[in-house]
Image (cartoon, helix red, strand yellow):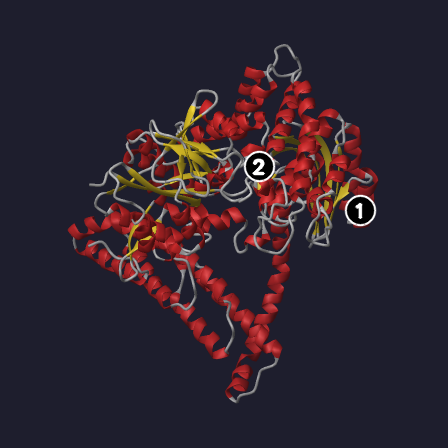
Amino acid sequence: MSGPRYVCIHGHFYQPPRENPWLEAVERQESAWPAHDWNERVTEECYGPNGAARILDEQGRIVAITNNYARMSFNLGPTLLSWLEEQCPRVYQSVLDADRESMARFGGHGSAIGQVYNHMIMPLASPRDRVTQVRWGLADFERRFGRRPEGMWLAETAVDTASLEVLAEHGVAYTILAPHQCARVRPPNGEWFDVHGQRVDPRRPYRMRLPSGRSIALFFYDGPIARAVAFERLLDDGHRFAERLLGAFDGRAEPQLVHIATDGETYGHHHAYGEMALAAALGRIERTEGVELINYGQMLALHPPTWEAVIVESTSWSCMHGVERWRSDCGCNSGTGWHQAWRKPLREALDWLAGELEPRFEREAGRLLADPWAARDAYVEVVLARTDAAIDALLEEHGIEGLGDEGWRRRALALLEMQRHLMLMYTSCGWFFDEPSGLETIQVLRYAARAVQLAYQLFGIDLEPRFRERLAKAPSNRSEYGDVNGIWRELVRPSQLDLTDVGAHFAIASIFEDVWSRPLRGFDANVIENDIAFTGSSRLAIGRLRVRSRITLDAADYSFAVLHLGDHNLLGGLRDFDHAARHVAMHGALRHAFDRADLTEVVRQIHRHFDQQTFSLRSLFHEDRAAVVERLLEDRTRGVEQTLEQIYEQTAPLMRFLQSVGQVPPPVFRVSAEYTMQARLHRALSAGVDIDLAEVGRLLDEAKEAQVVLDPVALGQALLKSLTAVTEAVVAEPESLVRAETLGDLAVFVSDSPWKMDLALPQELLWRHMRDHFGTWRKGGEAAEALRAVIGGAAVSLRVRPPR
């Protein structure tokens, strides 16, 4: 008779840090289109769907929606969780809810585990960085999940004994490794035997005894099944996925654990709708007699390891050469045919930078902080909160008493922030891919640039020239850059900011109210004076503002003037506010010229008073510049649209005649027709709860008659937004038959539409709505029955099975 059998699926959900190191915000990434950035895109494809995975019946209808995270083991990187908390609170909450649900499911053991903070390759990290990575990862986890993690994920499962010692020292009970990372094992009271070459039995936990006398549990996942999930399309069929897991048991009497670990993005991002296959597999396993889903924490509690193991030192799951992928041209690549000779000199350059700054940090911070390295470990509380209260608490606990003025506080924060970026620049993704001009390597270089900038401000030393000499030794595969120094010059250096750049941004924003109302995450701006005057289409803003960094508390006062002549024509000036009389003189001269409509003189006065410290619309940061340009284009675009519509109205009868006799209309006729019909349909489909399907139908008939080619992606997205809005209105007003009927009609239209749409969100909303109300409606009168019938009809159209 076989013993207890368990299955555990672990997902390592992670995105590289993507925020601008100066603005502390993720900027638009064009390669992620149509999403704003890769975090957003992968959230739409993976992180969100796994929190609400759809389960289908034999007819392809949704019969249930489940939170995959609650039935698996998972980790989400701290930097990703921080982004989700701010940008996608619904998805973030689904992760927290899943951990609580899993504790109830798995005997008090939550399925979420921690991760070393910014995905640093631990065997290549300095001893101090190893400790801080673990402490920051633990602190981040506790803040979010309200408990200590039992396990911790090592970036790329990169492991050595020293890293395991740090985990064990901090109370981490286990970690997860690949099978080839096990060197030898032994049974209780038995002899050691070699298991190199993935010969370890993954179906039991192991304990590794460490030189310190501590120990840690190790789970070596099933390599062949994990590989089939990640690379062999096992997720094409959720039931086949489940059968593969269930087929890995043998007949032994002792407890068995079949488990795998893959990138969590496999379930939805790398493999479309992989979250549905995962949900189906988890459901199939739950229904299998004699097999239980489990997580690693519960497995350790029920069946502590009796076998011992020893790891292969300095190995990882994604490099067959150990950890060489992150420090040499080892041959591991993505198959593009490019070399990776840049990896070694890049790491050497960063190691040199860290080596230059570590003793300076220790010496200078030692004058301000009782224990600089303990303060660095505690600095995570400031990173997590970014509030004055968190700063006060940190400096009160770690600052040396009697330092006097506020300058020491700013200096201490700058020192700790420099250390943060010296760690972030070692994020593993910077070396993972084939070419250093990719987003991930540029990101680690930007962290290095921020550290170099802070070092200059703190110590008055310019390390950039010597640093770039070392970067020049790292060759790029792209001739336009030549080497990583060229990448630095073209793609990193231009992104650097200081308080003056921030002041210029806010000065321009002062004349665009919608931009001004959007705060920058890392800065505050207080307008002390802002005098805005108008003449014709021109505007002039003159004022004073104070800019303050929320990160380092550095602040500056500026005088500014901005002249906007319409369109993109903008000239501004910014200088330190150093004398009230000087500011008043500038203000008077500019207003005098502007009030006389002498714009040439205004321009001259701006150059006179601000000398070389002038700027243009380009000085707005990318996100807000795009918003301003879009707004400035509205009037121009509206005029072009009106012209094209007039051409279409005047030529439509003739165009239809030409088409009826087989003659091709002139290009300008076709362009005006296609643009006009696309614009009108897009407006009609975007009407949300006010959508008029009769008007949409009329426009579609007109477009068909005119034989215009429509953009199916844009129209499908517009229709999806309206469907979501109507579904949300039904949820908000559950007793409204009018809302329900609108949804019913729209659902029929959507089901007949040729446009491709991802209906996951409206389907989820509708399924939950029916789950909550169908029982009540069955017991109600005629009104309730009418609601049930209409909503049930909408569900059928949207491929959601009504409750029975």
Question: In the image, 646: left or right of 69?
Answer: right
x and y percent of residue 501 in the render?
A: 70, 38
Residue 375: quarter of image: top right
- Dot 2 surroundings within 10 Å: few (below 14), some, or many (20 or more)? some
Residue 671: quarter of image: bottom right
Residue 159 vs residue 283, the one in the foreground: 159
Question: Which amino acid does the dot numbered 2 rest on?
Answer: Arg
Instruction: Tell me the SS state at disc 2.
Output: loop
Circle 1 residue? 603
Question: In the image, 321: left or right of 200?
Answer: right
Question: In the image, 543: left or right of 201?
Answer: right
Q: Quadrant of the N terminus?
A: top left
Lower sequence index among marks 2 and 1: 2
Question: Which amino acid does the dot numbered 1 rest on?
Answer: Val
x and y percent of residue 172 in the render?
A: 42, 27
Residue 586: quarter of image: top right
Is residue 292 in view? yes
Is residue 136 in view? no
Say which residue appears at 54% left-offset and 50% top-offset: 36
Instruction: Tell me the SS state at disc 1.
Output: helix
Which numbered disc covers residue 521? 2
- Dot 1 surroundings within 10 Å: few (below 14), some, or many (20 or more)? some
